[in-house]
Image (tube, rainbow, N blue to C red):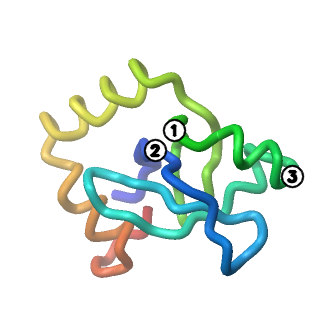
Amino acid sequence: MCIGIPGQIVALDGSQAGTAWVDVCGVRRSVNIMLVAENEAAGTALIGHWVLVHVGFAMSRLDEDEALETLQLLQEMGEVEADVRGFLGQGEGVV
């Protein structure tokens, strides 16, 4: 199943404009943030905030309570492990 998964923006990715490092369940990956931050200043303001990640893009912003609740529900459904593998590009699905 290919779904979006909550992740927390931890830093801007200095190697590529419009990307940031996002932590999903302890796994970090560079993600395109152009859909949620129109420029570098807006991207910097997102550090520490939560986003919904799907196929390498931050699709929307989430508040922390919503992000944590979603992660908890995914864990209860047994979806997080498979989605984290997808997040890493190591599975059939891609997050």
For image coordinates 52% across by 48% down, the residue present is 9
For image coordinates 35% across by 74% down, the residue present is 88
Helix, strand or loop status at disc 2? strand
Q: CA distance from mark 2 to mark 3?
A: 18 Å
Which residue in the structure is indicated by mark 2? 8
Q: Nearer the viewer, residue 60 or 12?
A: 12
| Classed neighbour count for the residue bearing mark 1: other residues with Cα under 10 Å, few (<14), some (14–19), many (≥20) | some
Residue type at the position of mark 1 = Gly
Say whether disc 2 or disc 1 marks the residue closer to the N-terminus. 2
Which residue in the structure is indicated by mark 3? 39
User: Residue 85: horizontal and vertical position, in percent?
Assistant: 26, 69
Say whether disc 2 or disc 3 marks the residue closer to the N-terminus. 2
For image coordinates 62% across by 69% down, the residue present is 13
Contact check, label 2 and label 3, Cβ < 8 Å? no
The furthest residue to the right: 39
Which residue in the structure is indicated by mark 1? 48
Quadrant of the image containing the N terminus: bottom left
Horizontal side, residue 13 vs residue 68: left or right: right
